[in-house]
Amino acid sequence: MVVGLGPGNRENFTPEVLAAIKSAQVVVGYHTYLDLIPDLLQDKEKVATPMRGEVERARQAVELAAAGKTVAVVSSGDPGIYGMAGIIIEVAQGRVPVRVIPGITAASAAAASLGAPLMNDFAVISLSDLLTPWETMLKRIEAAAVGDFVMVLYNPRSYGRPDHIKTAREIMLRYKSPETPVGIVRQARRGPEEKIITTLGDMLSHEIDMLTTVIVGNAQTRVEGDFMVTPRGYRL
């Protein structure tokens, strides 16, 4: 089983996720994710691997499952969105059955805190270039901006790549107004949550890091009180 823990707070675990973890004999995951569920890991075998240990994590999980153990591989958010589901399926190659159990992804968690910015078409782009070439990422950012998609940016800034978010903003400003609403949510649903609604022109004056999800509106997105709203198109 590949399980999505959602943002990390227990209130956002689905009943299916809880049942899957409880039924597992072995729980495999990045140690930060395992630290979110210590009470669920009592009397279970645990396999913790460091960041960037995804391939080894997947191989260990598949070998344990092939040996007859019930294994749950945990991811934050949804395991099929920048998570472990794909690599588990690739490594398993049909040797063991794989079941993917969804979780709430950062885009949904951040959007709920902001109001309703994703009511129309949107694109999700990670600004981490560890696995995706930067040149490819630039093309995707431009294509989404040209298409006037609402854009959700994951992994927007780290110590190793402090300027990717600046470059992404420069590209978006070629096609979007500087007044385009932007929502910045840090630690969405993983408390203490911080959020701010600003503009594309002013967004870089606010704190943005790896724990932040950035949502950039489209030409119709507007601010309604404390909310960021992208109209669906209904006539009111």
Image: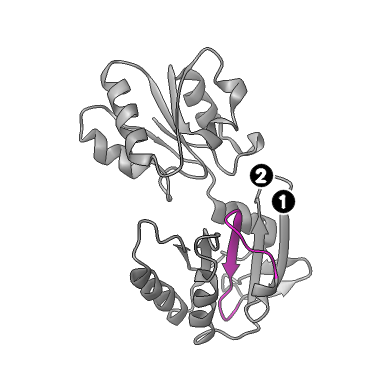
Residue 16 x %, y %: 50, 30
Asked if one can make out residue 236 in the rendered structure from this viewpoint, the answer is: no
Q: Residue at x 62, y 56 (%)?
A: 110
Looking at the rendered structure, which numbered label has been put on residue 47?
none
Residue identifier under label 1: 193
Taking depth in this image into account, of 164 and 61 the one nearest to the observer is 164
Residues rendered magenta in the picture:
206-220
> As drawn, which residue projects farthest toward the top?
43
| Badge 2: residue crowd in 10 Å (few <14, some 14–19, many ≥20) | some
Taking the magenta stretch, the answer to whether it contains residue 214 is: yes
Q: Predominant secondary structure in magenta?
A: loop
Residue 180 x %, y %: 62, 80
Taking depth in this image into account, of 33 and 19 the one nearest to the observer is 33
> As drawn, which residue projects farthest toward the front?
160
**Residue kind at label 2, given as amino acid type:** Arg
Taking the magenta stretch, the answer to whether it contains residue 7 is: no
Q: Residue at x 58, y 73 (%)?
A: 217
Write down the quadrant of residue 25 in the picture: top left
Measured Cα–Cα span from mark 2 to mark 1? 6 Å
Q: Secondary structure at mark 2?
A: loop
Residue identifier under label 2: 190
